[in-house]
Amino acid sequence: MRLSQVSFRYSRRGPWILRDVELMLRPGSVIEVTGRNGAGKSTLLRLLAGIIPPSRGTVTDRPRVVGYAPDVFPVDQPFTVTDYLTHMTRVRRASPTAADELAVRLNATHLMDQPVGDLSKGSAQKVGLIQSLLAPPGLLILDEPFAGLDEQTRIELPVIIGEIAAGGGTVVVSDHQNQLQNFPGADHWLVAAGAVTAQTGERPRQAVIEVLVDAAEADEVEQKLRADGYTTRRAS
Ligand SMILES: Nc1ncnc2c1ncn2[C@@H]1O[C@H](COP(=O)(O)OP(=O)(O)OP(=O)(O)O)[C@@H](O)[C@H]1O
């Protein structure tokens, strides 16, 4: 798949969010997308997924089956998770057992009978993930998929990403928590000032900060930080 001279703005007179982006996506590659808040990561992912068309330029050779999990899953829907996934299974012509199998892998079986509107952000994120994986995607686009996920899912998701890449799919993940930093062979794209810079094999720089907390709160703070995807280590 290729993006040639792709530029995008949300309205005719609005600011350019992306300009003259040239990108090549190889089958079997995993790409981690980073950039500051508002840099245009979600916009780039929507362009890749075909949710929005480029204002200028072209996207060619997009794989036929695209899985897309947005950063915010729309929860204002009047049906249960099972109803929603059953519907999406039909739309995608996926295997009738795919949703249940994914629910087990992503620790979501307890959500199946819940109304979509009652889901927490993390749970809604999981349903969005399951939806994106129902039919094996040739292109999988995940927008901040690790935000709010539990430990089991956080470990399982990179395994699933690896399986899709091993099957020849391309996986693009925006990941400000750097959960894919140790993913073998992942490419890295940096979105900044309207440009996307491909940095094959390079990792974003990391920093260590020390946080001093009351001993009684240490467990709680550590859990919160880990839930947000940070690596923590007790100093004593
Ligand atoms: N639907 C929209 N209409 C108009 N402007 C938008 C729309 N969606 C995003 N923008 C603007 O486009 C720019 C890029 O937003 P985008 O969500 O792509 O950035 P991001 O890098 O994903 O940010 P974040 O890390 O905060 O999610 C921002 O200035 C944002 O305000």
Image (tube, rainbow, N blue to C red):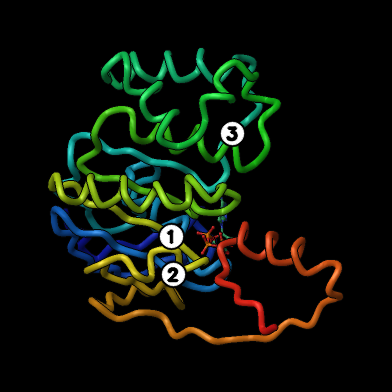
Residue matched to label 3: 74
Task: Classify 96 as above or below 60.
Answer: above
Residue 34 is marked as 2
Q: CA distance from mark 2 to mark 3?
A: 23 Å
Label 1 neighbourhood size at 10 Å, few (<14), some (14-19), many (20+)? Answer: many
User: Disc 2, disc 3: CB below 8 Å?
Assistant: no
Q: Position of residue 75 (x, y in %)?
A: 63, 30
Task: Classify 159 as above or below 194.
Answer: above
* Residue 46 in sight: no
Left of 5 or right of it: where is 16? right
The earlier-in-sequence mark between 1 and 3 is 3
Residue matched to label 1: 174
Residue 214 is marked as none
136 and 214: which one is in front?
A: 214
Q: Position of residue 224 (x, y in %)?
A: 70, 60
Res 121 → quadrant = top right
Q: Residue at x 68, y 37 (%)?
A: 120
User: Disc 2, disc 1: CB below 8 Å?
Assistant: yes
Q: Position of residue 164 (x, y in %)?
A: 23, 45
Q: Residue at x 25, y 52 (%)?
A: 162
Q: Amino acid at mark 3?
A: Pro
53 and 115: which one is in front?
A: 115
Left of 131 or right of it: where is 164? left
Name the element at disc 1: strand
Label 3 neighbourhood size at 10 Å, few (<14), some (14-19), many (20+)? Answer: few
Name the element at disc 3: loop
User: Disc 1, disc 3: CB below 8 Å?
Assistant: no
The earlier-in-sequence mark between 2 and 3 is 2
